[in-house]
Image (cartoon, rainbow, N blue to C red):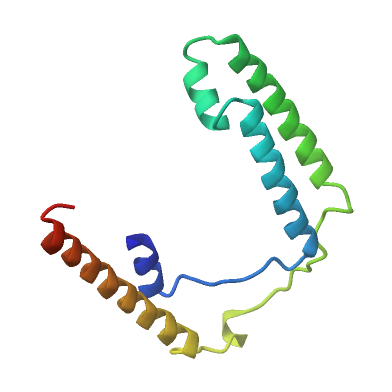
Amino acid sequence: IGCLVAALLANKVKFRLPASNIRIFQAIVGGILSGYGARLAFGCNLANFFTGLPYFSLHTWLFTVFMVLGIYLGVKICNTSFFKPKAKLERVNKENLPLNKQSLRTKLYFNLGILLFIAFLVWVFYLVFTNGNI
């Protein structure tokens, strides 16, 4: 909650969708494959990697080899022309950009951050004074 409030107060939050629908497809397929990989690895992929390697576990070494091969194959597939985004880069100058000091979005996110911070404080005080402990 604290990170969200700090990001809202600093106006560093921007909700957006990817420019290409291919990226949405890649995210969905990647999430499905990651979940399937977690199931095959008997839990979290990273925990399997970082806890199994010091013990020289055979299944962790096999997991590591096939994870590296899968990453290599995934990068090769994503670099094909079908999966590359169609976005074009455009050069801009600082002088040409309009300065919008206080947009409506900036004010809205700042006020939302203040509201979330106050709600969090009220929640903490409620927990402390009703139960006696957190």
Q: Which residue corresponds to the image point at 35% horizontal and 68% vertical from the top-left? A: 5
On screen, residue 84 versus residue 126, left or right, reads right
* Residue 114 x/y as whole percent: 31, 78
Using the image, determine if residue 10 lies above or below residue 2: below
Q: Which residue corresponds to the image point at 21% horizontal and 63% vertical from the top-left? A: 124
* Residue 21 x/y as whole percent: 78, 64
Using the image, determine if residue 1 lies above or below residue 40: below
Quarter of the figure with residue 94 = bottom right
* Residue 11 x/y as whole percent: 43, 75
Quadrant that contains the N terminus: bottom left
Q: Which residue corresponds to the image point at 35% horizontal and 67% vertical from the top-left? A: 6
On screen, residue 92 versus residue 8, left or right, reads right
Residue nearest the viewer, comparing 89 with 62: 62
* Residue 51 x/y as whole percent: 47, 21
Q: Which residue corresponds to the image point at 75% horizontal and 48% vertical from the top-left? A: 29
State the count of labels: 0
On screen, residue 67 versus residue 84, left or right, reads left
Using the image, determine if residue 79 lies above or below residue 49: below
Using the image, determine if residue 112 lies above or below residue 7: below
On screen, residue 65 versus residue 21, left or right, reads left
Quarter of the figure with residue 62 = top right
